[in-house]
Amino acid sequence: MTVTYREKDYRVYSIDREKIEKRLAKYDKFFRTPAEATVTIKKGRVSVTAEVTITSGNLVLRAEKSDDDALSAIDQCCEALERQLRKNKTKLENKYKSAGAPVLADFDGDVEEEDLSIMRIKQVTLRPMSPEEAVLQMNLVGHDFFVFYNVDTSSVCVVYHRKDGGYGLIEPAF
């Protein structure tokens, strides 16, 4: 597995890199295509936040955890990633079997099943507006995200609240 590091106000030393790569190497057995991992470590005021994103083909797994120690946060991320794999293994295999390219390799362990049925369908009218207007509308209705038709790019976009208190914009890429 190829591991890429991003450091924000935190330095990952080579000894820590070896430990992180060793912990992530065990996930190679879960994927049939080569996987790439991106490890982002951010130093906060009180704790260290680790974010691990593993990409293999069209499959993306992501976990983010905070702890006093970076390696402890990485361990928590690894546990969360493994839970995600076990929880969704059957669904992922069924989805990709039709394409003839299974993503996950066989592994032992209990597989958790989750009901993915849609409980409610809501239709919205997409009004043309700028992203700034969409943020204003989102705040007026009190939602965490807002779908709108972006007049600048002529596409359907989403604005959302970020954990850091700012706003994000999701635009489609074709």
Image (cartoon, grey):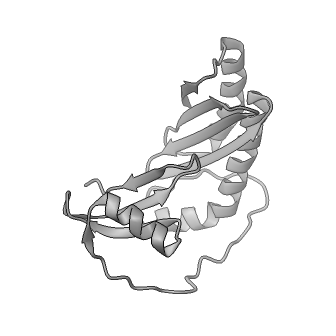
Q: Quadrant of the N terminus?
A: top right
**Nearest to the observer: residue 60 or residue 173:** 173
**Nearest to the observer: residue 18 or residue 170:** 170
The quarter holding residue 77 reads top right
Residue 99 against residue 104 in the figure, above or below:
below
Q: Quadrant of the C terminus?
A: bottom left
Name which residue lies at 72% across and 49% down.
80
Residue 2 against residue 92 in the figure, above or below:
above
Residue 69 against residue 152 in the figure, above or below:
above
Name which residue lies at 38% across and 54% down.
169
The location of residue 70, given as percent across then percent down, is 73, 29
The location of residue 122, given as percent across then percent down, is 45, 85
The location of residue 164, given as percent across then percent down, is 57, 46
**Nearest to the observer: residue 146 or residue 58:** 146
**Nearest to the observer: residue 91 or residue 60:** 60
Left or right, 167 with respect to 118, comes to left
Left or right, 156 with respect to 95, comes to left
Residue 43 against residue 87 in the figure, above or below:
above
Name which residue lies at 50% across and 52% down.
59
Q: Residue furthest top?
A: 14
Confirm whether residue 32 shows in the render.
yes
The location of residue 97, given as percent across then percent down, is 48, 64
Left or right, 21 with respect to 124, comes to right
